[in-house]
Image: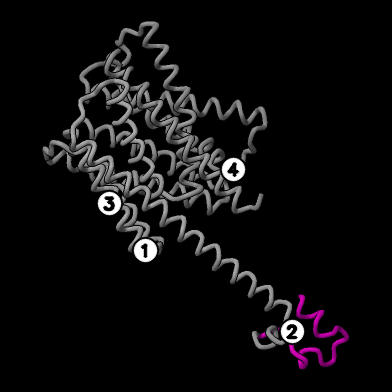
Amino acid sequence: MGEGERFQLGTVGALTLSVVSSVSIVICNKALMSSLHFIFATTLTSWHLLVTFCSLHVALRMRFFEHKPFEQKAVMGFGILNGISIGLLNLSLGFNSVGFYQMTKLAIIPCTVLLETIFLGKKFSKRIQISLTTLLLGVGIATVTDLQLNALGSFLSFLAVITTCVAQIMTNTIQKKYKVSSTQLLYQSCPYQAATLLISGPYLDKLLTNQNVFAFKYTTQVTVFIVLSCLISISVNFSTFLVIGKTSPVTYQVLGHLKTCLVLAFGYILLHDPFSWRNILGILIAMLGMILYSYYCTIENQQKAVETAAQTSQAREGESDPLINVENGGAGVGDTVGQKSPVWSKSKD
C-alpha cells in the first residue's frame, strides 16, 4: 500500500470516527439534559477535557504515543483560546434563539474561508465555493427557524465565530509547523482547555441556567450518563484534532454539518422528534453540497498530487543532468581551475 493510499485510508478512518463519536455523544447528552435535567453544558465539557487528558496520560505511560514538547507559549495560547471558544458558543446559545445560534454555526465556514484567504494565502476554487454555498443553504433550510436578534447575543455570537475559526485554523497550522501529531497536540493543550472551563464553567452555567452545578442531585442514572458522556468525549476530542490535522478546518466544519443532519434524522427515526418537509428538503440539499464538496476536494487533491510528482521528477532530472547544474549556477569548468577535485564532486557539495 502506497503512502497516498495510507493517507486516504487514515483520513476516511478519522472522518468516520468523528461522525460516529459526535453523533453518539449528542444522543447521550440529549438524554442527560432533556430527560435527566442535567443542563450544565460548560461544566460537563470541562469534565470531558479532564477525562481526555487523564486517558492520554495513561496512554503516554503505556507508550502508545511519544511526548513531543514544543513552544510552551503556543500551546498555552492555543489551549486557552479553545476553552474560550467553547464557553462563548455556549453563551451564544444561552443569549440567542436556537435559530440565530444555528446561523452562528453556519457563519463559521465562510469566516474560516475568509481568514485563511487573507492571512494564509489559501485559495478556494469556484467549485468548492459553490459546493459550500449549497451545503450552507441546505443546513440553513433544515435547522434555522426563528431569528430573534439582540445586541448582547449578537456580540457574543460574533466573538464565538472568530475564536472558533482561529482555534481551528491554529489546530491545523500548529500540527504542520511543529510537526506534532494530533494526539501530541491534544495531550499538551488539554490541561489549559480543561482549566479554562473548570474555572469559568460553574459561573457560566449559573448565569445561563440560574442553577448551581454543585447543588444538583446526582442520582445513579445521572452519574452513569455523565461517565458515559466523558468516555465518548475521548473519541470526540481525539477525532476533532485528527480530522483538522489530516484535512482542514473547513472540511471539519463541513463534517460538523453532516453530523447535524444525521442527528436530525436519528432524532426523527429513533426519538420521533417532529419533522417537516422543510427539514427533509434542507437535509437533501445539504447532502448534495457535501457530496459536491467531497468530489471536488478529491479531484483537486489528485491534481495537486500529480503536479507535485511532476515537479519532483523534474527536480531529480535536473540534479542528474550536469548541463542543467551549470545553467542554474552549479559548478562549472572554470570553478575547478587550480583544484584537484573534479567538477562532479564539487557539484555534489
Mark 2 and mark 1: Cα distance apart in space? 39 Å
Residue 82 sits in which quadrant?
top left
Q: Which residue is mark 2?
A: 322
In the picture, the quarter occupied by the C terminus is bottom right
What is the count of numbered marks? 4
User: In this rendering, does residue 101 appear at all?
Assistant: no
User: In this rendering, does residue 316 appear at all?
Assistant: yes
Name the mark nearer the viewer: 2 or 1: 1
Furthest residue to the right? 340
- SS label for mark 2: helix
Mark 4 and mark 1: Cα distance apart in space? 36 Å
Q: Name the residue: 42% across, 12% down.
A: 224
Q: Which residue is mark 1?
A: 125
Mark 3 and mark 4: Cα distance apart in space? 41 Å
Q: Earlier in the sequence, mark 3 or mark 1?
A: 1
The question of residue 332 being in magenta is answered with: yes
Q: Amino acid at mark 1?
A: Ser
Q: Name the residue: 28% across, 32% down.
A: 90
Q: Name the residue: 74% across, 89% down.
A: 332
In the image, the segment drawn in magenta is: 329-349
